[in-house]
Amino acid sequence: MSEAPTTTPTRPPATVITASDGVHHGTREDRSGDLLADLLAEAGHAPIDRRVVPDEVDDLSTAIAAACADGARLVVVTGGTGLGPRDVTPEALHAVTDRVLPGFGEVMRAVGRASTPLADLSRSVAATRGTSLVLAVPGSPSGARESVEAVLELVPHALDLLAGDTGHGDVSSPPPEHDHAGHDHAEHDHAGHDGAAHDVAAGPDHGEPGHVHDDSCALAHGEGDDDREVGTLMAVFASPLSALLLAWGRELGYRTVLVDPRVAERDAPTAPVTDEDPSPMVVAATPEAADPTTDVVVTDHHRDELVDMLDTALDTDARFIGLMGSARHEGPHVGPLRERGRTDADLDRIVRPIGFDIGSKTPAEIAVATLADLVARRNDRR
């Protein structure tokens, strides 16, 4: 019996632009362009346009602008992100884009470090043009693939925000009529919410008799304001996981901080994440500013600065300190922290592994499990 075909979610049109003198003149194969076109098609982007241009700022700028004008919501330029005299892709991108997204570039470089210590020489960058997202990634097939894969899960949310879909709804307009599809219209409670059950048996309109309207119900339907104190989420070390934690953490109301000494040494990102939320992304070198409303999540246990980061966090009153890892063996931080005089009580403050056990494997799954755990702790439901 044949297996049922899998359905790939449909995502907006995309364009892959190869910046290469060799490919443009027919002396090299467009391996990176082919690979990225296949990768985006697998992710559900359709249709996918292909363009090849020489390593010239004007040609590249024109191609990027034309791709956006032709309807591409995602434009990926491969090649020209190095330090060679003909590597001009970032310059071409900046010439025709509106806003830079520093976090994307940091994530792409962070992933590249796993393959080569020269990843920090890459000038991979992301920016926006109108409602389109433009990525500039390395020209090598491996570098192009790992860079795009590192940020691919963030792309749909970024495109929604660029299109004006913030996910918060218009609280000035009355909610549309709905019937909670899948429910039996009996009295029910939103699972995990702190509030009394509300009865929709009398009708889908929340203004009808029989509907008990409380604050929890309003929040569940995107109405009203959540005045609970949320606090700060500190994601330690730039990584695919930290990028997701920070992006989704903001949706949960956190003030977000990326802690990474390597990023802090460079110009800290200060661009607002959205027009609606003008607060900038904060970058710090250490977690020493953590307070009793701060959740510290360390997303990479291979970094040389791991012990220093945890030691500093333990000196604070952080509400939560967690470390990515496996429960099957002792963490690499335990011995060095004991040598520094840390007690069992200190080590017990470090939660490892992080997140609920939902079989997480990918950065997105780990982020979901971690944030669910943090929300549960915050709501005293752990």
Image: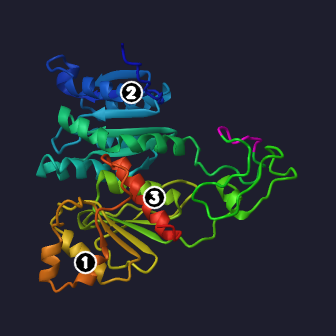
Give residue 128's position: percent from left, percent from top.
45, 43
Q: Residue at x 33, y 22 (%)?
A: 51
Residue at the spot of label 2: 15
Q: Residue at x 25, y 47 (%)?
A: 123
- Cβ atoms at labels 2 and 1 below 8 Å apart: no
Residue closest to the far right: 209
8, 81: nearer the viewer: 8
Magenta span: 176-182
Q: Amino acid at mark 2?
A: Thr
Residue closest to the far top: 1
Relative to residue 112, is residue 292 drawn left or right? Answer: right
Give residue 253's position: percent from left, percent from top.
53, 63
Give residue 222's position: percent from left, percent from top.
66, 54
Q: Quadrant of residue 256?
A: bottom left
Relative to residue 162, is residue 102 drawn left or right? Answer: left
Residue at the spot of label 1: 347
SS class, disc 3: helix
SS class, disc 2: strand
State the CA–CA distance, disc 2 to disc 1. 49 Å
**Of pointers 2 and 3, the one earlier in the residue sequence:** 2
**Of pointers 2 and 1, the one earlier in the residue sequence:** 2
Residue 149 in sight in this render: yes
Give residue 111's position: percent from left, percent from top.
23, 48
Residue at the spot of label 3: 372
Specify the principal SS of the magenta part: loop
Q: Residues within 10 Å of mark 2 (few under 14, many from 20)?
A: many
373, 48: nearer the viewer: 373
